[in-house]
Each structure stands twice: as C-alpha cells, then as structure tokens.
Image: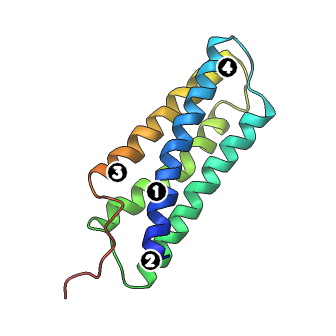
C-alpha cells in the first residue's frame, strides 16, 4: 500500500471518527449526563489520529510529494491537531452538560471541516510539484 493511500484511509477514518464523537457527545448532552472517562480517551485518540495523519503528510512531503495546496493542508492539519485538546483546556476539564454540548458542536465542526478539505482537494492527490 502506498503512503498516499494510507493517508487517504486515515483521513477518511478521521472524518467518520469525529462524526461519531460528535453524536456521542450530543447524546450525553441530550441526556443531561456528564462526560465519562471513555469520552476523554476518545478525545485523546482523535488528537492522536490527527497527529498521525499530519506525520504521514510530512513523510509524503519529505518524499517530494505535495498536495495541490500544501500550505493550506498543513494549516488545517495543525488546527485539527490542537482544537479538541484546546477546548478541553479552555473548559478546564469541565464534564457537565454544557461541556458535552461544546464538544459535540466542535466534533461535528471538525468532521465538516475535514470533509470540506477532502472535497476541495486539500488532502490530495499527492504529486510531484512542477519543475
């Protein structure tokens, strides 16, 4: 399997993972429940997944391949990497209904942002730049 194919698979996985995370947080908020430890682990996994995708993108870049909009790609990926832990930090670890709603909105926003990146060819195809 080519590294570019792995990148595409992981990026699609990120979109679906954030969609599931948003639905999970939304259901916790709708049930007026607090955020569980499992959800915090899922948030950590989402940041780790974004980090792995970014590392694969860096590896592809080091091989000489570039997406059509390389700068935009790296800016978006850095955003996706830091935004979920950033919300956790901003909320100071709160686990009430409003925090669950905030995480739901952010996760669904991240899923739509990642989907938009894929639709606008920000994430690929990876090719050699023109000389």
In the image, farthest residue toward the right = 37
Label 1 and label 4: CA atoms lie apart by 27 Å
Q: Nearer the viewer, residue 37 or 11?
A: 11
Q: Residue shown at 63%/44% (left/top)?
A: 85
In the image, farthest residue toward the front = 1
Image check: 17 left or right of 93? left
Q: Residue shown at 51%/43% (left/top)?
A: 16
Which residue is tagged 2? 60
Q: Residue shown at 77%/36% (left/top)?
A: 38
Label 4 and label 3: CA atoms lie apart by 28 Å
Label 1 and label 3: CA atoms lie apart by 10 Å
Image check: 113 left or right of 85? left
Label 1 and label 2: CA atoms lie apart by 14 Å
Q: Position of residue 116 (x, y in %)?
A: 33, 45
Quarter of the image for residue 67 reads bottom left
Q: Position of residue 61 (x, y in %)?
A: 41, 78
């Amino acid at each position: 399997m080519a590294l570019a194919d792995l990148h595409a698979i992981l990026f699609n996985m990120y979109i679906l993972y954030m969609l599931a995370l948003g639905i999970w947080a939304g259901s916790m908020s709708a049930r007026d429940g607090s955020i569980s430890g499992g959800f915090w682990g899922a948030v950590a996994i989402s940041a780790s997944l974004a980090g792995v995708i970014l590392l694969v993108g860096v590896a592809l870049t080091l091989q000489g391949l570039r997406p059509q909009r390389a700068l935009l790609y790296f800016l978006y990926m850095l955003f996706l990497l830091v935004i979920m832990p950033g919300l956790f930090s901003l909320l100071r670890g709160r686990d009430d209904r409003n925090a669950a709603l905030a995480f739901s909105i952010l996760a669904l926003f991240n899923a739509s942002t990642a989907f938009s990146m894929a639709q606008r060819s920000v994430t690929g195809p990876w090719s050699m730049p023109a000389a």
